[in-house]
Amino acid sequence: MLIFYQRWSRRLYRLRPLFILLCVGAAAVFVWLLFSGTPQQGQQWQLSAVVTALTALILWVWATLFHTDLPVSAPGQGFATRIKIRLHLMMLYILALLVSVLLLATTYLGLRVLKGIIANLFFS
């Protein structure tokens, strides 16, 4: 699982500025909808802006966090070094699980938003 995350983070690493811009843009749209948008616009697009900002932020974290090489223990290392490497790998694995859960949650919210947009466009 960590190798999968590392491989994809290396592909996403050069897109980090785009993720930051997307996150800031979506947050700006959310603030605009909150203070200046009409109630109908706010009801329709606020969740979309939040989901976009969260997804961009999570992808930026993914690209930044897992970009480095994974630590590998050599046979001649001491016990403390091997334990340190295992703890490091365990923490990376827990962070990978957390990122997976967050991505699944934002995907679910994104699908809910998409369903609402489609229902509003075609059935109202």
Image (tube, grey):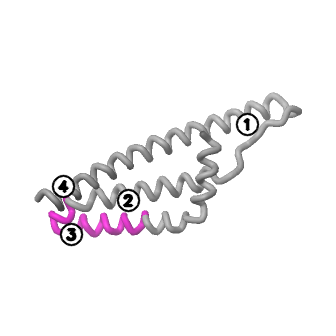
Report crowding for label 1: few under 14, some 14 to 19, many 20 or more residues within 10 A (C-alpha).
Answer: some
List the residue tagged with mark 2.
52
Asked if 72 appears above or below 107 in the picture, the reply is above
Inspect the image, locate mark 2, and give the three-letter code of the amino acid beneath it: Thr
Could you tell me which quadrant the C terminus lies in?
bottom left
Task: Give the number of the disc on residue 37.
Answer: 3
Residue 35 sits inside the magenta stretch: yes
Question: How far is the residue under mark 1 from the one under mark 3?
Answer: 51 Å
- Callout 1–callout 3 Cβ contact below 8 Å: no
Q: Residue 67 appears at what percent x and percent y?
A: 64, 53
Report crowding for label 3: few under 14, some 14 to 19, many 20 or more residues within 10 A (C-alpha).
Answer: some
Q: Is residue 107 left or right of residue 58?
A: left
Q: Nearer the viewer, mark 1 or mark 4?
A: 4
List the residue tagged with mark 4.
119
Earlier in the chain: of badge 2 and badge 3, it is 3
List the residue tagged with mark 1.
85
Inspect the image, locate mark 4, and give the three-letter code of the amino acid beneath it: Ala
Q: Quadrant of residue 64?
A: bottom right
Question: How far is the residue under mark 2 from the one under mark 4?
Answer: 20 Å
Question: How far is the residue under mark 4 from the one under mark 3?
Answer: 21 Å
Earlier in the chain: of badge 2 and badge 1, it is 2
The magenta segment is 23-43
Inspect the image, locate mark 1, and give the three-letter code of the amino acid beneath it: Ile
Instruction: Determine the residue positioned at 38% across, 59% down.
Output: 52
Indicate the secondary structure of the residue bearing disc 4.
helix
